[in-house]
Every structure is written in structure tokens, then in C-alpha cells.
Image (spheres, grey):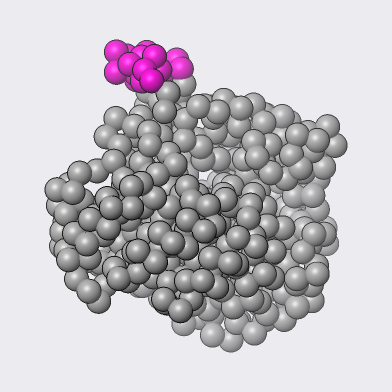
């Protein structure tokens, strides 16, 4: 296929106010450079994001902005929780260099090949491969490229993907390490099978009923019982009636908090728990047996994210109690997800927009989860991450699974974003701005760029920098 000739119509159903970007042929849009930013938001100040493994995170973004020979730019992030964000930003710089001098047309004509190209710098690959810091850096670049493409087309990213033909969708994926779980031909057939009923799901997106929300923000481990109850009540009052609580501290405390939460939520509403990897396999089983009376739907990250057989053992042990196993926010690539699915180790597949290597690799995992009949519940903790996962939940529902993905809602520091997520009546409001929805306001970058921004040079900021490192 020649560059720029993808079968994507510029449909008239996109609100005209969102149409952006150049009308130059896509083959004339050239990436001429990039900027990177180490952004850190001081969430540790109020214990937002605190859990059993991560008591004091400052939600951060390794941010890449691709610049072109026009006024179009592509914005991408990877998510971290503070220290180490500089490493991811450096990795993103090394990978972004591979995009400079290329046209948007040649990069998007075969996105699967482009993704393989970006992970194939053999010297950078040595410090992965396809995992850890180098992969987080990759996702910032890949997400920026998809954002640039969607802005060029004047579409939100979810719509761009939903408008691809099954063949074009599948061509975005590097199948090298997953073909033993799903072939490109199977994937095309799977997507084609969903096409007939797609229009009804797009209607759900238009009426803001495609992505149901749950909140973690009442149940951070560092919150007092009183604050938790107050937050549960205020969420219930606005229609947010599904909750996740952090566990994995002292088991007596976990039981106390869960009892209070269950009594406040009521016994029919959905409650989930998340241990953030703190337990061994036997501890996970024994501790969860002490929590089953509070009827959690699933235990998230019960143990090491690399322990596929451990997750399978926990799942088997908890099945008689009706408690499922969920994981994914630390699953380093599609190969780990493949094995979790092949080993019947998970009940819920928690894709992450940044831990995986950007949109392309997420699409691969969505297809595998569909084939193995495991529902998607994306991970959204982070500032900007939820803006990404709303698109992934939408496109998964509309063209991959046909089932709604329950999506975590996070809105800490939403004021730093130009287009923060919105919820209404317990659902996400479908985004219509062109692109992938993560663009920070210039004043936010000026305040939170680390360590030179105005917040980080203030007394409060220096207090965090020079304070204890938990
Ligand atoms: Mg989690």
C-alpha cells in the first residue's frame, strides 16, 4: 500500500470544532524534531495513589512532543511515579530520534513495520528487550506518533482505530512473538465477526454509555477511615457506584477498612481489591481467604507481575470463593499477557497504555484477550493515563470484544490537562477532540517540569526533593 492511502474516510460525523491539522497530503508531513519533558506532579502531598507497595508516589510523565514541518504536533507520554522518570525520558529521547526525518505517510502506511523498527535498535534492545525503562520510553514515542496521526485526520484516536478495516487494524501489530496464540488471519476473522453489530456500539459511544467507570480514589491506603467513607459517599452521590480498595497492609487493617467500605457501599454494589504485588503466592491465597466475606469481585496484582504460574495457582485456589484474579499494569509486554492467558492465570486483563509499548502492542493484547474470552479492565492510575485508557476501552468495546470494559477513573491534577476525562452518571463521557487526549497546558509544564519548574523550586517542592525517600 502506498503511503497515505489507508482506507480511512474523513467522516462527516466528527464535530467540526474538533477538526484540526493540516490538509497537506500525509506524505508531505515530516517529523523534523522532538522535545522531551520530565514532568512530575506532587501527588505524595495528600497520599493520592498510595498503596501497599508504593506509599508515596509523585505521579509523573515522561513526555515527548513530536514536531513537524507544519503546525501539527504529536504528544505522547509514559507514566511513572517519580524518581526514575528521568531515565524513561532519556530512553524516549533515544527512541524518538528514529522518527526524525520520516514522513507521517511512510510511518503510518504500515504501523506494524514501524513498531518493529522502533524496537529494533539493536544496542537499545540490549537494555530491554521490550521491557522496563526502554519500553516505557518507547510507549511515549509510539503514543505520540498515534496522537500525531489522529490529529492529522481530525479524529479522536478511538475513532481512527474503529474506522480501520480489519486488515488495516491487524497490520498495526507485530505478531512475531504471539503467533502461537493468535494468527493474523484469526485476528482478521475475529474483527470481521464484530463488524455487523459495530454501529450499535458506536451509538453507545455517542450517548456516553460505552465505558462504565469505577473509582479507586476513595480507597488509597494512606487515607483515613473517615476520608474513605466521605469519598465513597460523595462518589455514590454522583452515580459512581463501583469501587476498588487498596489492601496488602496489615490484614487486620484490611479487614477493618473493607468492612467499613462494604457497609457504606452496600452489599450489592461492586467492590474490588488491589494488593500491588506485596504478597507471596501462599500469602495471597491465605490473606484473600480472610477477605472473601466482603465479596471482592477480584484481587488485583496479588503477587509478582512476572509470576504466571503463581497467578494461575492463586486463581485456582480462589475460584471456589468466587474471587477472580486481575493483573496487567506491570505486565511488561504482550508475551507475558500471552502466557497469562495461555495458562488460565487471570480472570481480568488489565492492559496499560504506557507499560505496553503504546497503541500497537495494546491492540495485540486486546485481540488475544478476546480470543481467550477474558474481559479487559484497563489500568488508569496516573495523570494522563486515564485520558489514554478511555480511548482503549472504547475501541475494545466497539471493534474487538463487543463487551464493555469497566474502566478505572482517576482525576487527580486534572487541571493540568487540556482535555481531562469526564464522567457522568457512572460512565465516561466519550472524547471527541482530535488525537489521543493527552496534552498538558503550557503553564502546567512550566510548573511541574522536574527539577526546574516553579513548583519544584518552591519550598514545598524542595521539601519533597530533600525529604525522606520511601
Ligand atoms: Mg493496581
Quadrant containing the C terminus in the rendered view: top left
Seen in the picture, residue 28 relative to 214 is either above or below; the reply is: above
Q: Residue at x 58, y 86 (%)?
A: 196
Magenta stretch in the rendered image: 451-468
Whether residue 457 sits left or right of residue 158 in the image: it is left
Q: Position of residue 150 (x, y in %)?
A: 58, 53
Whether residue 61 sits left or right of residue 161 in the image: it is left
Quadrant containing the N terminus in the rendered view: bottom right
Seen in the picture, residue 46 relative to 171 is either above or below; the reply is: above
Whether residue 287 can be seen here:
yes
Location of residue 307 (image quadrant):
bottom right
Whether residue 213 sits left or right of residue 110 in the image: it is left
Q: Position of residue 394 (x, y in %)?
A: 48, 66
Depth check, front residue: 36 or 59: 59
- In reply to whether residue 214 is colored magenta, the answer given is no
Q: Residue at x 40, y 63 (%)?
A: 288
Q: Position of residue 95 (x, y in %)?
A: 72, 34
Outermost residue toward the right?
122
Whether residue 23 can be seen here:
no
- In reply to whether residue 466 is colored magenta, the answer given is yes
Q: Residue at x 47, y 56 (%)?
A: 283
Location of residue 309 (image quadrant):
bottom right
Q: Position of residue 110 (x, y in %)?
A: 78, 56
Amino acid at each position: 500500500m502506498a503511503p497515505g492511502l489507508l482506507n480511512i474516510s474523513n467522516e462527516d460525523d466528527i464535530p467540526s470544532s474538533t477538526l484540526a491539522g493540516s490538509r497537506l497530503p500525509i506524505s508531505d508531513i515530516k517529523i523534523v524534531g522532538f522535545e522531551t519533558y520530565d514532568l512530575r506532579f506532587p501527588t505524595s502531598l495528600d497520599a493520592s495513589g498510595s498503596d501497599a507497595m508504593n506509599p508515596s508516589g509523585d505521579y509523573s510523565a515522561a513526555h515527548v512532543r513530536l514536531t513537524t514541518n507544519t503546525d501539527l504536533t504529536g504528544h505522547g507520554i509514559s507514566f511513572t511515579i517519580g524518581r526514575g522518570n528521568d531515565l524513561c525520558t532519556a530512553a524516549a529521547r533515544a527512541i524518538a530520534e528514529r522518527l526524525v526525518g520520516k514522513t507521517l505517510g511512510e510511518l503510518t502506511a504500515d504501523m506494524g513495520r514501524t513498531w518493529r523498527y522502533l524496537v529494533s535498535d539493536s544496542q537499545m534492545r540490549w537494555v530491554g528487550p521490550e521491557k522496563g525503562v526502554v519500553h516505557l520510553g518507547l510507549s511515549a514515542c509510539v503514543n505520540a506518533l498515534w496522537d500525531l496521526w489522529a490529529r492529522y485526520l481530525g479524529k479522536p484516536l478511538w475513532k481512527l482505530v474503529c474506522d480501520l478495516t480489519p486488515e488495516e487494524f491487524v497490520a498495526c501489530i507485530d505478531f512475531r512473538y504471539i503467533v502461537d496464540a493468535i494468527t493474523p488471519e484469526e485476528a482478521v476473522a475475529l474483527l470481521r465477526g464484530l463488524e455487523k453489530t459495530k454501529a450499535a456500539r458506536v451509538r453507545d459511544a455517542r450517548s456516553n454509555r460505552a465505558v462504565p467507570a469505577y473509582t479507586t480514589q476513595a480507597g488509597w491506603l494512606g487515607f483515613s477511615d473517615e476520608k474513605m467513607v466521605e469519598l465513597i459517599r460523595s462518589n455514590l452521590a454522583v452515580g459512581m457506584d463501583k469501587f476498588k480498595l487498596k489492601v496488602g497492609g496489615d490484614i487486620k487493617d484490611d479487614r477493618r477498612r473493607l468492612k467499613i467500605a462494604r457497609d457504606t457501599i452496600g452489599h450489592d454494589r461492586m467492590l474490588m481489591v488491589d494488593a500491588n504485588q506485596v504478597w507471596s503466592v501462599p500469602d495471597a491465597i491465605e490473606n484473600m481467604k480472610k477477605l472473601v466475606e466482603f465479596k471482592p469481585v477480584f484481587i488485583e496484582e496479588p503477587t509478582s507481575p512476572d509470576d504466571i504460574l503463581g497467578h494461575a495457582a492463586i486463581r485456582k485456589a480462589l475460584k471456589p470463593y468466587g474471587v477472580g484474579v486481575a493483573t496487567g499494569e506491570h505486565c511488561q509486554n504482550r508475551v507475558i499477557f500471552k502466557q497469562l492467558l495461555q495458562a488460565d492465570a487471570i480472570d481480568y486483563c488489565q492492559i496499560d497504555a504506557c507499560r505496553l509499548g503504546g497503541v500497537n502492542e495494546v491492540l495485540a493484547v486486546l485481540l488475544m484477550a478476546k480470543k481467550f474470552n477474558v474481559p479487559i479492565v484497563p489500568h488508569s492510575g496516573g495523570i494522563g493515563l486515564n485520558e489514554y485508557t478511555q480511548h482503549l476501552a472504547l475501541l475494545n468495546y466497539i471493534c474487538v470484544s463487543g463487551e464493555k470494559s469497566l474502566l478505572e477513573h482517576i482525576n487527580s491534577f486534572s487541571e493540568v490537562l487540556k482535555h481531562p476525562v469526564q464522567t457522568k452518571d457512572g460512565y465516561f463521557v466519550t472524547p471527541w477532540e482530535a488525537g489521543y487526549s493527552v496534552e498538558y497546558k503550557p503553564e502546567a509544564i512550566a510548573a511541574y517540569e522536574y527539577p526546574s519548574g516553579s513548583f519544584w523550586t518552591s519550598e514545598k517542592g524542595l521539601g519533597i526533593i530533600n525529604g525522606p525517600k520511601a
